[in-house]
Image (cartoon, helix red, strand yellow):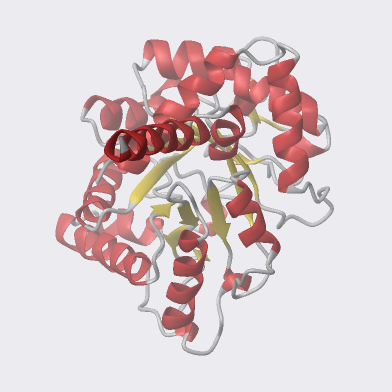
Amino acid sequence: MKKITLFVAFLFSAIFCFAQVDSLDIKIGQMIMVGMSGKSANKNSAIIKDIKKGIVGGVLLFEYNINPNNSQENLLELTNDLQKAAQIPLLISIDQEGGQVNRLKMKYGFPSMPSAQVVGQKNDSVNTRQVGNTIATSLSKCGINLNFAPVVDILNPNCPVLGKRNRCYSSDVKTIAQCAEIIIDEHKKLHIKTALKHFPGHGSSTTDSHLGLVDVSKTWYVEELFPYKYLIDNGNVDMIMTAHIINKKLDKSGMPATLSKKIITDLLRKQLHYNGIVVSDDMQMHAISKFYGLEQSLKLSINAGVDIVIFGNNIEGAKDYTPENIHATLKKLVLEGEIPLSRINESYNRIMALKKSR
């Protein structure tokens, strides 16, 4: 009898744990990635409380999260503390492209990491592999498991947020794809996930989506999709980040790509046959936050096919949305039928598959 009682207790415990992991609250939480304040985290930190509640599934780190003293050791301690608070392992991410978008700087004791443009100009596979290994090794030593790189936008010297900042490998799409493939391969060797950006192509823009709406309808050309198709076909894509750009060649309504079902579901998923995770660019960038409220932007982006929404809380003038509010708003939209439960399940399954992969 005692053995049966213990077995029943174990069974109910297992069912309860399974139910918790697969609850709607947990599923929605896995779809939310947020920035955090401070350079450390303890039991009283807001981010630790949010992780323990299960209302966030990922954390995005910025340079202000890096302690200038013993940077690598302190960053590893921070990421370990974040992971210890999580019921499901976190995606802990950073933008570490090299060049100007380079959080792990030499002044913090990290090695030099050249820009994508410098890498593309050399266009030497040995050098590109060395750069990729340097970036991935630095991330691995800090406990960061997702890099929002490589950029596969075309090099356009007139693009203020990309070309002028040397963030693109080349104006030649084949060179872009080849460089990105090597960078991704070096990250995979150290079990670091990567994200291609910014779909369906931001390089041809002449304005900055951090500041407002960007329309590439007259400047974008279909060859900008080549790096995505090449890498998807070769099975080298963990994630794809959307751009907050208008492209009426792809969606006549003028809906920004992050909110466009025609661009994410019809083009990326159905035409390019991509089945992995789609992550939004920061939803607080002004191209979204100035023109769409929290509820509307969440509804449109998730229904369009976005799996993870990012709220970095790092852009001047953007409303400081709390994780609780983001989670509650998403749950409300599901319970009211504005977002189908099937969409939540699709995203949750993709996220869990990525988290379980090596």
| In this picture, residue 158 sits left or right of residue 125 | right
Residue 98 shows in this picture: yes
| In this picture, residue 329 sits left or right of residue 96 | right
Residue 263 picture quarter: top right
Residue plotted at (56% across, 36% down): 26
Q: Is residue 93 above or below residue 354?
A: below
Measured as percent of width and height from the top left, residue 196 is found at: 41, 40
In depth, the one of 5 and 76 nearer the eye is: 5
Residue plotted at (63% across, 56% down): 35
In depth, the one of 344 and 311 nearer the eye is: 344
Q: Is residue 232 above or below residue 183?
A: above
Measured as percent of width and height from the top left, residue 215 is found at: 68, 28
Q: Is residue 293 above or below residue 170?
A: above
* Residue farthest along the bottom direction in this orientation: 69
In depth, the one of 239 and 251 nearer the eye is: 239
In depth, the one of 102 and 99 nearer the eye is: 102
Residue plotted at (64% across, 34% down): 244
Measured as percent of width and height from the top left, residue 93 is found at: 48, 55
| In this picture, residue 2 sits left or right of residue 46 | left
* Residue farthest along the left direction in this orientation: 126
Q: Is residue 176 above or below residue 234?
A: below
Which quadrant of the figure contains the N terminus? top left
Residue 5 picture quarter: top left
Measured as percent of width and height from the top left, residue 84 is found at: 47, 62
The number of discs equals 0
Residue 172 shows in this picture: no
* Residue farthest along the front direction in this orientation: 1
